Image (cartoon, rainbow, N blue to C red):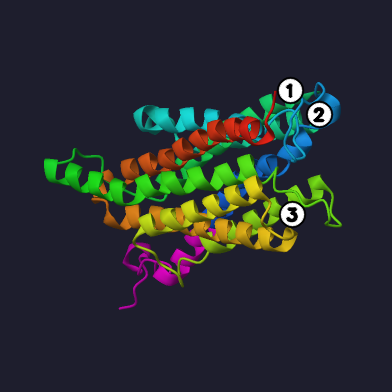
Amino acid sequence: MAESEGGDEDPPSPPPPRAENCRNGAAFWLLGLCNNAPYVVMLSAAHDILRPNQLPPAPHNTSGHDCGPISTGAVLLADILPSLLIKMAAPFGAHLVPYSVRVVAVAIAAWGGCSVVAMGAGVGVSLGGVALLSASSGLGEVTFLTLCSAYPSVGLSPEEKRAVLKVLLRNAAPLALVYFFEYFINQGLLELLYFPTSALTHSEQYRWYQLAYQSSVFASRSSLRCCRFRHIWGLALLQGLTAGTLLWAVASDWLPSFGPALALVLLEGTVGGGAYANAFCNVNEEAPPPARSAAVSVSALSDSVGIAAAAAAAVGAHRALCHVT
C-alpha cells in the first residue's frame, strides 16, 4: 500500500557536516572582520587623529625624533580601556543578555563611534568616538567568541578547574605578553621610526607601517589550517625580540632605510596574528567542555590587559625617547 500519510514520509536530510562547517566558518570570519575593522582603522589613523593643527604647540624636545605633542599611545588607551572593562564584566553578566540584543548594541555603538570621529570636532571629541568604538569591539569580541562554543551550563569539578587554569597559563598568559610587545611597537615606536630620506612623509610612513601590520595579522589569523602552534610562549619570546630590535632602532638609528623597518613590522604582525588564532584554538580544544566558554572569555580578557599595559608604556616611552621637557 502506498504511503499517503505526511507523517510516514522520511524527514529531510540534514546538511552535510562539511558544508555546515564551511558556512559557520565563513560567518564567524565575516563577523570577526567587521568587528575588528573600526578598531583597526582608529589605530591606523592615530597619527591623523592627533593632527598638529588641533593641538597646542609641541613641547620642546632635545631628541633627533620628529615627535608630536601627544603620543599615539593616547589613541590606543581610548581604543582599549572601554573594551577591557567590558571584557572584565562579561563573564559575570553577559549571559543574561540575549545574543541578538548584544549584536544590535555592537552595531549601534560602532556606527556612533565612527560618526563621532568622522566629525573631526577636536582631539577630545575624536578620542570619545574612539572609546565608543572600543566598547563596540569589546562587546562584539566577547559575544562572537563565546558564541563559537556550545557548552552545557553545569558546575566544574576541582579537576576541571585545574585543567582550565593550566590551559590559561599555557595560552592566555603568553598571549597577553605577545600583545604587550605588539602594541608597544605599534603605538610607542612606529611613530618615532621615521626616515627623512624616504620619498614618503612621516604620516605616510606611519600609515604604511599600519597597513603592513594589519595585512600580516589578517593573513596569519586566517592560516590555522596550514600553521598550528601549540607553544604560544615561543611566539611571545619572538615578539619580545622584535620589540627589542625596533626599540634599539629608534634609540640608535641603526636601521638604514624604510624597507627593513617595514619588514620587521610584517614579522610583528605575522607573530601577533598567529599567536591570537592559535591561542584561542588551543583553549577551545583543551578546555573541558563545561568551562569552554568561560575559558574563551578569560582569554579574550588577557590580550586586552596586554594592550592596556602597552598603551601606558607607549605614553611613557614617547616622553623618554623624545626627551620632552
Give the magenta range. Answer: 1-27
Q: Which of marks 2 and 1 is in front?
A: 1
Q: Which of marks 2 and 3 is in front?
A: 3
Element type at mark 2: helix
The residue carrying mark 3 is 208
Left or right: 138 with respect to 58?
Answer: left
Q: Residue at image x 30%, y 46%?
A: 168
Mark 2 in CB contact with mark 1 (< 8 angstroms): yes
| Distance Cα–Cα, label 2 vs label 1 | 9 Å
What percent of the width, then of the height, locates residue 158?
A: 13, 41
Q: Would you say residue 13 sits in the magenta stretch?
A: yes
Q: Residue at image x 74%, y 54%?
A: 208
For the residue marked with disc 3, what is the amino acid? Trp
**Label 3 packing within 10 angstroms: few (<14), some (14-19), many (20+):** some
Q: Residue at image x 19%, y 38%?
A: 155
For the residue marked with disc 1, what is the amino acid? Val
The residue carrying mark 2 is 119
For the residue marked with disc 2, what is the amino acid? Met
Of the 4 image quadrants, the one containing the N terminus is: bottom left
What percent of the width, then of the height, locates residue 134?
A: 59, 33
Left or right: 288 with respect to 13?
Answer: left
Give the numbered dot on residue 125: 1
Does 177 appear above or below 12?
above
Considering only order in the chain, which callout, 1 or 3, is on the residue closer to the N terminus? 1
Considering only order in the chain, which callout, 1 or 2, is on the residue closer to the N terminus? 2
Using the image as rendered, state which of residue 144 and residue 275 is in the foreground: 275
Does 128 appear above or below 32?
above
Element type at mark 1: helix
